[in-house]
Image (tube, grey):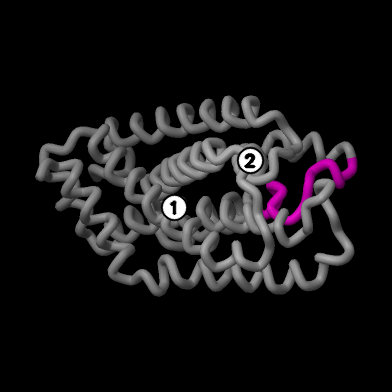
């Protein structure tokens, strides 16, 4: 087993050993959101013609859970390794920066997809879903998990304390996911907030993912795919450069 495979296996095993917390808890949280918002708004809100609000909500909850947990996996692993002091055992072996990047990000993708699949299984029977473009569903799920895993890697490298990591997550990741159209269409917002929402890359991930189910979206999925890909390449470039330089890792 080479270095990349070993690191990937270690990271997957790390979250799998506490699956009740890392996978089970997010599924329960998403289910509670669905029960509360779906029950309250089902008969009052319709976003797309012919699509019930509960059905509209399910893809958003799947993607929100997927994104947040992909970020949490990479970021928590690095900050824990820094504080506990076992990061040295990752840095001592002759692992290239690409192997480090791949091991952390792909394990984050696995956790994100595992949580997303679990949320789908738990919520899909609440409302009938269609699957107009399954390839878009898979594309945005994978790219969303990879992008947030990369952002988690950047945050984990940058942060030196748990409160810095909490600041990153509470003031950037959580607001960006909640304000990305999980619970609503941006077309229902005033013009100023519609335009502001278009600067949020999370919006394009959720909107494109939802298009795969209903064939309806606020933005052309090709445009969303292009924007998500550009942001992933940008964040990946930053993360790889940080790993290559040893920024906040080798001192």
Side of 212 relative to 237 (left or right): right
Which picture quadrant has residue 72? Answer: bottom left
Residue under circle 2?
132
Side of 60 relative to 159 (left or right): right
Q: Distance between the residues labelled 2 and 1?
A: 20 Å
Q: What element carries label 2?
A: loop
Which picture quadrant has residue 240? Answer: top left
Residue under circle 1?
113
Side of 94 relative to 219 (left or right): left
Which residue occupies 86% across, 38% down? 192
Side of 199 relative to 50 (left or right): left
Assign the magenta stretch its main secondary structure.
loop
Q: Can residue 231 be seen in this view?
A: yes
- Residue 71 rendering spot, x and y as whole percentages: 46, 51
Which of the marked residues, 2 or 1, is nearer the chain's N terminus? 1
The span shown in magenta is 178-190
* Residue sitting nearer the eye, 6 or 173: 6
* Residue sitting nearer the eye, 185 or 165: 185
Q: In which quarter of the image is the N terminus?
A: top left
Q: Can residue 202 be seen in this view?
A: no
**Residue 222 lies within the magenta run:** no
């Amino acid at each position: 087993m080479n270095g990349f495979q070993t690191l990937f296996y270690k990271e997957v095993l790390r979250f799998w050993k506490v699956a009740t917390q890392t996978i089970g808890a997010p599924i329960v949280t998403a289910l509670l959101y669905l029960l509360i918002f779906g029950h309250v708004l089902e008969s009052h809100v319709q976003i797309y013609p012919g699509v019930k609000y509960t059905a509209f909500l399910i893809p958003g909850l799947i993607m929100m859970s997927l994104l947040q947990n992909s970020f949490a996996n990479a970021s928590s692993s690095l900050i824990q390794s820094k504080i506990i002091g076992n990061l040295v055992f990752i840095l001592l072996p002759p692992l290239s920066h690409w192997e480090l990047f791949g091991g952390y990000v792909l394990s984050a993708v696995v956790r994100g997809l595992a949580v997303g699949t679990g949320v789908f299984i738990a919520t899909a029977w609440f409302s009938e879903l269609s699957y107009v473009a399954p390839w878009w569903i898979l594309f945005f799920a994978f790219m969303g998990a990879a992008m947030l895993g990369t952002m988690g890697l950047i945050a984990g490298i940058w942060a030196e304390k748990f409160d810095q990591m909490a600041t990153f997550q509470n003031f950037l990741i959580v607001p960006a996911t909640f304000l990305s159209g999980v619970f609503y269409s941006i077309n229902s917002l005033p013009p100023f907030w519609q335009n502001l929402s278009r600067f949020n890359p999370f919006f394009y991930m959720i909107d494109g993912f939802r298009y795969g189910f209903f064939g309806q979206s606020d933005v052309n999925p090709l445009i969303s795919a292009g924007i998500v890909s550009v942001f992933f390449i940008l964040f990946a470039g930053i993360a790889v450069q940080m790993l290559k330089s040893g920024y906040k890792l080798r001192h």
